[in-house]
Amino acid sequence: MRLFVMLALGLAFAASAACGGSDASSSQPTPPVVVEKPDPAGSWTSSSAGATLTMVLANANGAVSGSGVYSVGVTSVALTITGAYSASATTVSLSMQATGFQTLNFSGQLINTKQMVGTLNGSGFTNTAWVFNKQ
């Protein structure tokens, strides 16, 4: 009987050490999760009804600038782009200028790090929905 009690105590001790022992990995802090925030800076493209609009944008503390090309068939028009970005609301407003054409305005929102949706107005567009994808 004494052997049985000692064996039972030994097993109980081993089990408690395995369950309640210190695990070095559990005392390590969990590294923070890095979440990429939407940013209008980069190369963007969109196509609709046979037209393609590409842009390369820079973002300096909410001031957006860049260049682009609007193409329909074999005709392409160079664009100079200025605008604003609100990081807190992830909204973007862009003004696109081309010599000899009315200003084209885009108002939209970055819905994630790779997609911007909104509407185009001016130069023949009236609240026309466009979706831009980051390249």
Image (cartoon, helix red, strand yellow):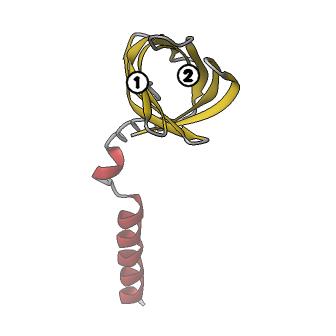
Question: Hey, what amino acid is under mark 1?
Answer: Gly
The quarter holding residue 28 reads top left
> Looking at the image, is mark 1 or mark 2 earlier in the sequence?
1
Q: Which residue is mark 1?
A: 68
Q: Secondary structure at mark 1?
A: strand
Q: Secondary structure at mark 2?
A: loop
Place of residue 103 in the rendered image (x, y in percent of width and height, measured from the top left): 55, 11
The quarter holding residue 34 reads top left
Residue found 42% across the figure and 81% down from its top: 8
Q: Which residue is mark 2?
A: 90
Place of residue 13 in the rendered image (x, y in percent of width and height, measured from the top left): 37, 69
Mark 1 residue crowding within 10 angstroms, few (<14) / some (14–19) / many (20+): many
Residue found 33% across the figure and 44% down from its top: 27
Q: Nearer the viewer, residue 52 or 40?
A: 52
Q: Relative to 35, say whether 107 is above or below.
A: above
Question: Hey, what amino acid is under mark 2?
Answer: Thr
Q: CA distance from mark 1 to mark 2?
A: 21 Å
Q: Relative to 29, say whether 42 is above or below.
A: above
Place of residue 72 in the rendered image (x, y in percent of width and height, measured from the top left): 50, 35
The quarter holding residue 18 reads bottom left
Q: Nearer the viewer, residue 100 or 1?
A: 100
Place of residue 60 in the rendered image (x, y in percent of width and height, measured from the top left): 36, 11
Q: Relative to 46, say whether 13 is above or below.
A: below
Quadrant of the snapshot with the N terminus: bottom left
Q: Nearer the viewer, residue 113 or 119?
A: 119
